């Protein structure tokens, strides 16, 4: 069974959207973890860890990767004391991982 071009696999919604309780395709709910994961994905993309969806090409832009990491660090600083334990751990672990990846790519 093949998926239609531009549709999210398995749900019948266009890319980036998900079905709500009524079955209508909508943007996913904005949550703190989703926002942090979005910034992480951006950093990974700019480190060449994720390929461009349309072309499959991987590019490295350390300035944009650093900007995404700086944004994550700002979020950690500005939300200190206001996060759940799970949110705090998610942010801490993502920052640890992405900083290691940045150093690894920057050394090449």
Image (cartoon, helix red, strand yellow):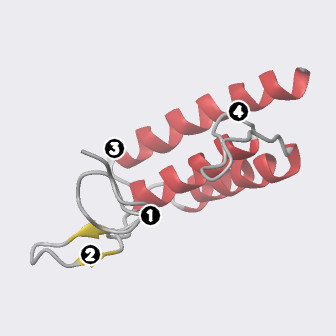
Q: What element carries label 4?
A: helix
- Which tag is nearer the camera, tag 2 or tag 4? 2
Cα separation, mark 2 vs mark 4, equals: 35 Å
**What residue does disc 4 label?**
99
Q: Which of marks 1 and 3 is nearer the N terminus?
A: 1
Q: Mark 2 points at which residue?
A: 25
Kindly report the distance in space between the C-alpha atoms of the residues bearing marks 1 and 2.
13 Å
Dot in front, 4 or 1: 1
Element type at mark 1 = loop
Query: Disc 3, disc 2: CB below 8 Å?
Result: no
The residue that appears at 86% across and 43% down in the rendered structure is 62
Q: Earlier in the sequence, mark 3 or mark 2?
A: 2
Secondary-structure class at tag 3: helix
Residue at the left extreme of this rendering: 22
Label 2, residues with CA under 10 Å away: few <14, some 14-19, many ≥20: some
Note whether residue 65 is visible: yes
Q: Name the residue under label 3.
A: 85
Q: Where's the C terminus, which quadrant?
A: top right
Q: Is mark 2 on a helix, strand or loop?
A: strand
* Residue labelled with disc 1: 6
Q: Which of marks 1 and 2 is in front?
A: 1
Which mark is first along the chain, 1 or 4? 1
The answer to which of marks 1 and 2 sits earlier in the sequence is 1
The location of residue 48, given as percent across then percent down, is: 74, 36
Mark 3 or 2, closer to the camera: 2
């Amino acid at each position: 069974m093949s998926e239609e071009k531009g549709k999210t696999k398995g749900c019948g919604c266009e890319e980036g959207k998900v079905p709500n309780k009524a079955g209508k395709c909508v943007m996913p709910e904005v949550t703190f973890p989703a926002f942090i994961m979005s910034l992480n994905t951006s950093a990974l993309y700019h480190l060449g860890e994720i390929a461009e969806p349309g072309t499959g090409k991987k590019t490295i832009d350390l300035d944009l990767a650093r900007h995404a990491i700086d944004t994550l660090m700002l979020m950690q600083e500005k939300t200190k004391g206001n996060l759940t334990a799970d949110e705090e751990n998610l942010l801490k672990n993502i920052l640890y991982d992405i900083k290691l990846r940045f150093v690894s790519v920057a050394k090449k």
